[in-house]
Amino acid sequence: MGNDRIKPNFLLVGAGKSATRSLYNYLIQHPDVFMPSLKEPQFFVARQVAGRIQKWVEDEQAYFRLFANAAGKKAIGEASVMYLLFYEEAIKNILHYLGPEVRIMMILRHPVERAYSAYNFVHLNNPAERYSFEEALQLEEERWQKGESLFMQYRRMSLYADAVQAYLQHFPHVHIMWYDEFRQHPDKVLKGVFEFLGLRSDVVIDYSKVWNKGGRRWKNPLIRWLLMSDNVFKRILKFFFRRRRGVRTHEFFTRNFMEQIEPMNPETRRQLVDYFRADVLRLQQLTGRDLSSWLQ
């Protein structure tokens, strides 16, 4: 590969379960933006994530081929949430391949709510998560050591301050967004993103759809087992729903086999707020953002 290959000039580095999928889908509606259909290649941390998530790209040529059709676009980027978790490895590789002028974006969410949202998403989609939230928190370090799914690192992926500080130190162009603001005023947040990327902001974006919407769980353990484990019933369903997005995202199953999640146990919430307190205070200092609501 020569120097003529097209490289990303912006990266959305996280955080996970902070509406990065929705942000990605809004961004690609802009005529001057190119992002590959593989939302999260995780190339710059491939060594760290290999075997611990479902998809990643570790071959250099394969990574840059993702951007082969981006010619003529002003903003070329990708979104990989593990660049926030493994920020040291990511920064080293981003600087090596893309240089310091690449624009870095991140969207951050209340760490306690992000952790609980991540747990409920994994519990809904991954049969290996068979524990309560409180039990899963206790197992986090053991799972980390065993090399289990990184998305089960509910607390670890909600610690932001070190990563934010490192990105701010290494890149002159860093744009931080806030999940609550994005949910309430996506048009305002996207306008800021387009200005950050040097794009015109007077484009029409359809904000009506929200992707990876959480807040659901299986109604009972038997239904969960039938729809998630490898069994005859599941194979029959996959045959009938093979042209759809899958049983866990199909409206029929959402309506009939799922229910709203329960609120977090107040004592668990209190303990997590205490756990994240020092990190939140550092993040507040780094960003100048009032994060007092994150300490409640």
Image: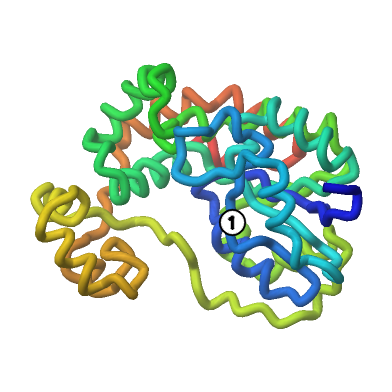
- State the image coordinates of residue 275 (x, y, percent, origin top left): 48, 23
Can residue 154 be seen at all in this image of the molecule? no
Above or below 91: residue 121: below
In the displayed structure, does residue 118 sit left or right of residue 205?
left
Q: Quadrant of residue 287?
A: top right
**Which amino acid, by three-letter code, is at mark 1?**
Lys
Residue closest to the far bottom: 204
Instruction: Tell me: 69 left or right of 46.
Output: right
Residue placed most toward the observer, 240 or 287: 240
Q: Residue at x 60, y 29 (%)?
A: 47
Percent x, y of residue 74: 86, 66
Residue closest to the eye, 170 or 176: 170
| Residue 136 shows in this picture | yes
Vertical comparison of 29 with 7: above or below: below
Instruction: Give the residue number, with chain letter if any, for mark 1.
Output: 39
Is 17 located above or below residue 235 in the figure? above
Helix, strand or loop status at disc 1: loop
